[in-house]
Amino acid sequence: MGKMTGFLEYKRCSNGDIPPKERLLNFNEFHTMLSEDKRKEQAARCMDCGVPLCQSAMELSGMVTGCPLHNLIPEWNDEIYNGHNEHAFSRLAKTSNFPEFTGRVCPALCEKACMCGQYDDAVTIHDNELFLIENAFKKGYIKPRIPGRRSGKHIAVIGSGPAGLAVADDLNHRGHSVDVFEREDRIGGLLMYGIPNMKLDKKVIERRQKLMEEEGVRFFTSINVGKDMKSKELLDKYDAIVLCCGAKKARELPAAEPGKVGGVYFAVDYLTQNTKAVLRATDRSVKALKEVGGYVNAEGKHVVIVGGGDTGNDCIGTALRQGAASVTALEMMPQPPKERSNSNPWPEWPKTLKTDYGHEEAIHLFGKDPRVFETTVKKVNTDKKGQINSIETVKVAFKDGKLTEVSGSEKTIPCDLLLIAAGFVGCEDYVTDEFGTKRGARGTVDTEEGGYMTSKKKVFSAGDMRRGQSLVVWAISEGKACAKEVDEFLMGYTGI
Ligand SMILES: Cc1cc2nc3c(=O)[nH]c(=O)nc-3n(C[C@H](O)[C@H](O)[C@H](O)COP(=O)(O)OP(=O)(O)OC[C@H]3O[C@@H](n4cnc5c(N)ncnc54)[C@H](O)[C@@H]3O)c2cc1C
Ligand code: SF4
């Protein structure tokens, strides 16, 4: 264990945040790391409780708690406390391909199940993980691991989000030759164009790409499979194909359709344009962004975001940096409690109110939480040019399991930019149509019971495309499990 009495001696101390006033001036990451001595204290808080629920990924009351990658958390906490950072990293790398992604964006399912969290604050597992991987890159512990022998098998991975990258990484290290095809101009999926730069600096993805290329993975960007390249070409050339195309089909808002009403956009399209502009700019400042232009600009506008979650919060943070005049986030669900309710005990996933970085920034700027719960958009109003200028909102309530409008609760609020972050309803049809793979009721790709092979032989699928919109850690976990199955399919047994 870390230190026998560590959990009694030290209080939890998370990585710091640059204050909103300062960080709103740019798109740089805003977390600051603890010193190595402080990190040791945080690792010392791990009790090595004997039943490490933190690494269990248990399903309790329909929600998973504990790490889906089964990261060996107590082991590396112990090694950090004892100053064996290289060994700690080697234990982390055993189960996780990309701790630099999860250490930045994972909602830390592990911490929700941490034994310390039952009566006190959980161990800073997520921050400890980030420390280990960044320290490993800094100290040169990470070197390209080039397979000694190649199997002669060739695999095409379609889509380079975290699922596709995990599939490619594991199959490459096993000795197979892997080509990754990506329709965007850069790899990373929603890590690149979705999650904004202030949460995950795009250089972090480029660093991983370089390493994977040195290890033998080949990336082909700006190739839209199903449009620029037909399935036959891939099926003829490769021994196996893995579809990791995500679940980008956005849930529509009946009251306002992007393209038909000016000033209405899907959240991911808005975020993508902004990140592309940030990457074109000379630096990551808001000033440099304005100079390059070519993105949907919230400057001076009253912005309304429909839908909460990570996507809605990222839209708030982005719109505020662009200089929005106001931001309102509409959420259909009731406001969750601040503390766990009796019916939601530890170590279940806590259904509590999460105030994320975008919310904090809005509170700093406007003095109030931007979220309005149990409310949706009833109608949009436009000017003569068809440009949105206000919306009518209405309160909603669940009655007998059905969502109903509360009559008389309508309100008109100014809105020059409406962003739809109402979730996703599955993968895009053209890829599954092209490969002739079956889709299920949830709009995702159907695979064998408990497995990753689609209805088409030698075509597999993993990540959001199979699972539905989820989390980065699940995409990596699916990618790893799928790589195992592909290896078994190719070799008759698996060495992964
Ligand atoms: C705005 C936003 C913020 C989020 N924030 C978080 C967060 O903070 N933490 C977290 O854990 N999760 C977060 N998520 C969820 C997380 O990003 C996804 O669950 C995860 O990226 C899914 O990985 P994936 O590899 O399955 O798919 P994706 O990341 O969607 O990648 C799919 C890739 O396939 C490519 N592709 C699709 N079709 C084709 C084709 N025909 N040819 C070639 N390429 C193709 C796409 O361009 C894309 O690059 C967020 C999601 C969004 C939308
Ligand atoms: S990947 Fe997520 S759940 Fe797993 S240890 Fe890291 S922060 Fe925790």
Image (cartoon, helix red, strand yellow):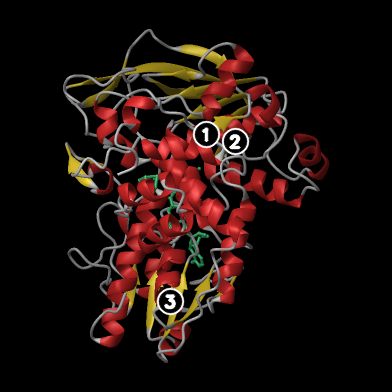
Which residue is pictured at 44% across the width and 57% down the height?
Answer: 89
- In the rendered structure, which disc, 1 or 2, sits on the residue that comes first in sequence? 1
The residue tagged 2 is 32
Q: Is residue 35 visible?
A: yes
> Seen in the image, is 212 located left or right of residue 322?
left
Q: Position of residue 258 (x, y in %)?
A: 55, 40
Q: Secondary structure at mark 1?
A: loop
Image check: 46 left or right of 101? left
> Which sits in the foreground, 263 or 314?
314
Q: Is residue 272 above or below residue 160?
A: above
Outermost residue to the top: 408
Residue at point 49%, 24% (across, down): 329
Find the residue positioned furthest to the bottom. 152
Q: Is residue 464 visible?
A: no
Query: Closer to us: mark 3 or mark 1?
Result: 1
Residue 240 percent location from the top left of the image: 37, 81
Q: Are marks 1 and 2 in contact (CB under 8 Å)?
A: yes
User: In terms of sequence position, does the residue under pointer 3 or pointer 1 come before the other?
Assistant: 1
Residue type at mark 2 is Thr
Categorize mark 2 by other alpha carbons within 10 Å: few (<14), some (14-19), many (20+): few
Taking the spot 59% from the left edge, 58% from the top edge, the residue there is: 139
Residue tagged 1: 15
Query: How much space separates mark 2 and mark 3, taking CA atoms?
Result: 33 Å
Q: Residue 318, image x and y in percent?
A: 62, 34
Q: Residues within 10 Å of mark 3 (few under 14, many from 20)?
A: many
Query: Which residue corresponds to the image point at 42% horizontal and 34% vertical from the top-left?
Result: 309
- Circle 3 is placed at which residue position? 173
The residue type indicated by label 3 comes to His
Secondary structure state at the residue bearing disc 3? helix
Label 2 CB, ligand 2: below 8 Å?
no
CB atoms of marks 3 and 1 within 8 Å: no
